[in-house]
Image (cartoon, grey):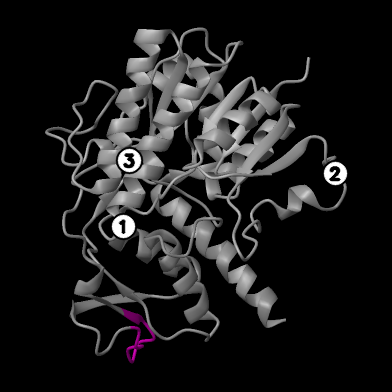
Amino acid sequence: MIKSALITGITGQDGSYLAEHLLAQGYTVHGLVRRASMFNRSRIDHLRTGGQISPERLVLHYGDLNDLTSLRRLLKQVAPAEIYHLAGQSHVGLSFEIPEVTVQENGMATLGLLEAMRDLDYPVRFYHAASAEIFGAPAAAPQNEATAFNPVNPYGCAKAFATQLCRVYRSAYGVFACSGIAYNHESPRRGENFVTRKITLGAARIKAGRQAVLALGNLAGQRDWGYAPEYVVAMWQALQVATPRDYVLATGKSCSIREFAIAAFAELGLGLKFEGEGVAEVGRRTDTGAVVVQVDPRFFRPAESTHLVGDASLARQELGWAPQVTGAAVARLMAKADFAHEQKVAG
């Protein structure tokens, strides 16, 4: 029997890779797409054109996380065996600017989906894309599934609320709901407003002579960076086990923004020199050919998560999941892909 899955956020980085993985596993994939005045499907266009995937196996549906009535209808129409809830406002820094939208999309929408699942007349498995931001400023590192929640930004608060809801519905109603507490995972499909893509795209454009300025925020920030295509495999694996539970998804290795930038620029044969604060000389080249990157206070967050590095022992033991591409290797991979695209654009 062919399984069917519904992915909210299918046009995002994780959604596009997950769609590829599920299609390769033989699934029929349904994706929830928000209607907008302009199409934003570039990450999945290769799946919809070329004739390799039939239209019956990849079906897109217009919908909105805030329109619960239409979501209920969609669940009854599609009758998915698995739901992967990846949609929502995903930018941590932006969550300070639009906290209500962030909480509505990441918190209340998850509650709405859980409630809708309770009304279905058949069992469905539910994956919730949680985040390491639920730990915020943890007392110790690395963090695991037992680490206390301590979010320090609206995004983390919303994800903590949704993660706890999954636990409540799992224990109170027997819903098969699990949360993947994913640490930062990147790829060439990452949005340009995320610092990792900003760095690698900046490096590629500077190398190509199409950009002269690169301004960054807190260079000392440490993150546990992995590779997105590996993380979507864990999402799928989490719904194949007999008993639902939460899993930390992480590499267990820490890398600073400074180290990430150095690796990205080095991949393209560019040296970096970091100087003071201010933007007067951002992006200028030194006499030695190194690119100067300066700290711009505008890109600091009101509150910063501290030392987020995860312990994915449980996922390794129960799912057999072991990420291979980490930190600087992710930076090099992304920079190479971005520069190849810049060369293609230049003709």
Q: Amino acid at mark 3?
A: Lys
Type of amino acid at the residue the image marks with label 1:
Ile
Residue 123 point in image, percent of width and height: 58, 11
Please give the name of the residue rendered at 79% of the width and 35% of the height, measured from the top-left corner.
Answer: 57
Q: Please, is residue 319 above or below residue 339 in the view?
A: above
Q: Are marks 2 and 3 in contact (CB under 8 Å)?
A: no
Image quarter of residue 272: bottom left
Q: Quadrant of the N terminus?
A: top right
Q: Position of residue 137 (x, y in %)?
A: 16, 41
Query: Could you say which is closer to the camera, residue 3 or residue 112?
Result: 112
Placement of 15 over or under 43, stated as above or below: above
Task: Give the residue at mark 3.
Answer: 253
Is 125 placed above or below 92 here? above
Mark 1 highlights which residue? Answer: 98
Q: Nearer the viewer, residue 186 or 111?
A: 111
3D distance between C-alphas at marks 3 and 1: 31 Å
